[in-house]
Image (cartoon, rainbow, N blue to C red):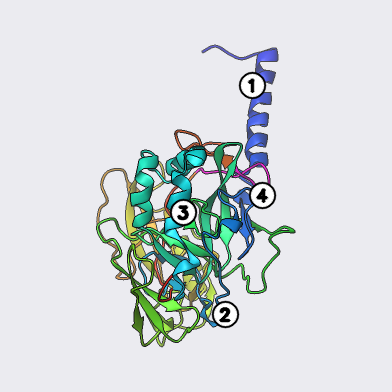
Amino acid sequence: MKRIRGRGRALVALTVVLAVFGLLTTGCIGMGGKVAVRAVARGVPTAAPFFKQAMALGADIAVGKALADFSGERDGGDPGLYGGTRDAGRCDKAKLVEFLEKPENRGKAQEWAKTQGLDGVGEIEGFVKRLTPVVLRADTLVRNHDFVKGRAKAFDALLEAGIAVLVDQFGKPAVQCTCGNPLKSFDHGIGDADVKFDDRNKEWSSYDSKKVTKVKPAPKEEPVEVYELVDVEEPDSGLARETGSDGTDDEVLPEAPGGPSEGPSGEPSEETGPPVEVPEVRGLSLEEAQVRLEAAGFEVATAEEASDTALPGTVLGQSPEPATQAASASLVTVTVAVPGGSQTGAPPVSGEPTDGVGTGEGTVGGQDGGTGEVGEAGEVGGGSGSDGGGSGSGGLFGGAAEGQ
């Protein structure tokens, strides 16, 4: 084998140091493995939005008593996940399409379509038509995109509850209504988020780092047909909104959908106790994970996942995620590595199935807490990565009759 000597060895060492430094400074990885997340407050435009708020594409709303009291990963189709109002103009899909179809906006339209995974601007109208306006009921992690120097630039963001968004047929936030910014899933664990506030987006009064949510899209074979929303203007009632509608034909529900007894393990019920923080057990052996979780007051279920790299018995993922709140005595499912091949069986203990923990190499860097430029292949500036799907389950937002 050829050895590297003298200057050659020094150059290799310098290259490694610079590469690691670059990852740290661009936000690909942070000290302690944290990911820089930019806070986006209700009613405050992002640094370089696709559309100016003066265009009146949509409007956010204070959710008041409709503010969700849950955290963690939530399934996009869960009743009560989103909220809404009876104002159809709170998220104007027609204006969004009209703007993107103007010849002078073709550059933005191309970047917008590419970020959404569309084959071209010709697919925008059909794509937007299938979206549904809702209002976030909880502070929600997403992958947001500004428009800078002719390109879409990605950044991880925490959207404040009350921000109006369009969701797709799987419940995944796809567009921030007030500015038209395309949205994708937050491709990291909730506990990995390092939320940064600034002078424009000051910490809002309802912010609680332990009540942060991200949305897991509903299964592709089970798209959402009707969203059951909490009416944010009348929080004791709800709205049934057909997917793709604007809210003008909502059915009023006598009671708000969802509720503590209907939520996931993070919600209190008669069988569980008050919420406590879920400890981190990924990377531990199954035995160590069980000891740690049971000491925190949780019951443990296991699922198996084939792995050619991890030692058998190593915990690969957990649900709910670490650092989120879950009711004491509730179930935590851990996914354990088994020798490579196909999965060997179902969880030996009944409980919520787990899809593992969302992962990704998407990075943030640059200005305002970090942005990465989205290229043709979905690369994110400052490092490589792609928009990935979040994971989780539960009810999160609310809705209202005509609008968002």
Tell me how far mark 1 sits from mark 2, CA to CA.
57 Å
Q: What residue did someone put label 1 on?
A: 12
Tell me how far mark 3 sits from mark 2, CA to CA.
28 Å
Q: Can you tell which quarter of the image residue 356 is in?
A: bottom left
Categorize mark 3 by other alpha carbons within 10 Å: few (<14), some (14-19), many (20+): many
Categorize mark 4 by other alpha carbons within 10 Å: few (<14), some (14-19), many (20+): many
Tell me how far mark 4 sits from mark 3, CA to CA.
27 Å
Q: Which of marks 4 and 3 is in front?
A: 3
Categorize mark 2 by other alpha carbons within 10 Å: few (<14), some (14-19), many (20+): some
Q: Residue at x 62, y 38 (%)?
A: 23
Quick check: 124 left or right of 192? left
Residue numbers of the magenta segment: 361-371
Residue 392 % position (x, y): 41, 63
Q: Nearer the viewer, mark 3 or mark 2?
A: 3
Q: Residue at x 41, y 45 (%)?
A: 310
Instruction: Judge by depth and name the residue closer to the eye, 65 or 5.
Output: 65
Q: Residue 369: give its label.
A: 4
